[in-house]
Each structure stands twice: as structure tokens, then as C-alpha cells.
Image: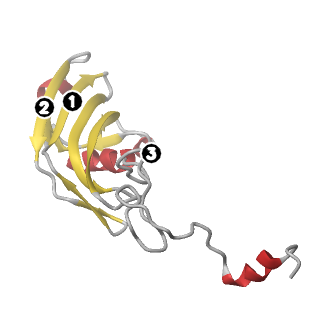
Amino acid sequence: MRINVARLRHIEGSSQDFSFSEVFPSLEIGGEEYVFEEPVNVNLNVINTGKSLLVRGNISSVLKVNCSRCLKEMAYKLNLKFDDEWIPSEYAKQGDEDNALIFDNDEFSIDSRIIEHILVSLPMRFVCSEECKGLCPVCGVDKNENNCTCSDEVIDPRLEILSKWNKGV
């Protein structure tokens, strides 16, 4: 996704809207693969503030992920808003790269920035529903579909002797 801001850069206070819809490759993070089931839709409003461009955007798509509790595949709807500040290199000062994005030409790519916003917005764990009971840690049965007779009480073998304490043994 490339934004051409040639017209916008020379008129302070002007703004322009951009819309993109693009198929993104799957993301792999920590051994997990996240597949985009739909194209990534990006709507941007770019405002010339004089010395920089304020980019306000909305990203939406659907990711195919696995529930962290029951491991079933699920769809995760992605809908997030973001604000970025882009500074032309001729106005950039020392230290601006920590707070803003710097660009050289009248056209720049925002693909990597979109991916960053998506990655930052993802939850630590995906859960298909708050009521999801997950898998039994002993036999592996899906507790949402079946009940098992396994005991939830797992005793560390190193501390097993303490379970007999105060029972008259």
C-alpha cells in the first residue's frame, strides 16, 4: 500500500482520504501461524499539519487462529484504529525518529506500519468464548463436548509426602 502525498504536502490544513484492500500473507509469531481469511481493509485520513502529516486510520480483517483453551480453529475479527505522525525528512530533527515516522519522497509505503499495528493489537491468547472449558490436562478430552473422570488435583511427586501430613500416617 503506497500513499502519494504530493498534492497534500504543499497545502497546510488540507486532508485526503485513502482506502485500500489488500491480501496479506499469513503472519508467524512464536511458532503460531495467523492466516488472514479476508483481505486487510485500510481506511486512512491524512491531514497536513504544517510540518508533518497526521495519519488517522482504521484496519479491519478476519484472522484464522486457534483457541488457547480448546485448540479449535476460530475466526478473530480485527478492527482497530490508529494514529501516526509522518514527518518529511527536511523537517525532521534529531530525536524525531523516536516519536514519528520520517519519509523522503512524496510517496511512501505503509505495509510494514499496518503489520506493526496489527501485531501490537493482538491479544496474548485467543479464546473462542469465555465459557470455554478447554482440554483436560490429563486425558486431553475437550471438556466442552465430553466429561472425563480425571482428577483435577495434580500433586507434584516431590511434595506428595506432605499430602499425608496431619492425616495420622
- Residue 104 horizontal/vertical position (percent): 23, 43
Quick one: 27 or 10, which is closer to the camera? 27
Dot 3: element = helix
Amino acid under label 3?
Answer: Asp
Q: Quadrant of the N terminus?
A: top left
Which numbered disc covers residue 100? none
Quarter holding residue 15? top left
Amino acid under label 2?
Answer: Ser
Residue 110 seen from this side: no
Task: Between label 3 and label 2, give the one nearer the viewer.
Answer: 2
Amino acid under label 1?
Answer: Leu
Quarter holding residue 103? top left
Colour scheme: secondary structure
**In the rendered view, does 131 fall on the left or right side of 85?**
right
- Residue 87 horizontal/vertical position (percent): 31, 36
Which numbered disc covers residue 19? 2
Quarter holding residue 106? top left
Would you say the residues marked 1 and 2 are in contact, meaning their CB atoms lie under 8 Å apart? yes
Would you say the residues marked 1 and 3 are in contact, meaning their CB atoms lie under 8 Å apart? no
Where is mark 3, residue-wise? 98
Q: Quadrant of the C terminus?
A: bottom right
- Give the residue at x 48% y 74%: 138
Spatial CA distance of label 1 from label 2 is 6 Å
Where is mark 1, residue-wise? 44
Quick one: 135 or 87, which is closer to the camera? 135
Q: Earlier in the sequence, mark 1 or mark 3?
A: 1
- Residue 36 horizontal/vertical position (percent): 18, 52
Spatial CA distance of label 3 from label 2 is 27 Å
- Give the residue at x 33% y 34%: 82
Q: Mark 3, residues whose alpha carbon is within 10 Å: few (<14), some, or many (≥20)?
A: few
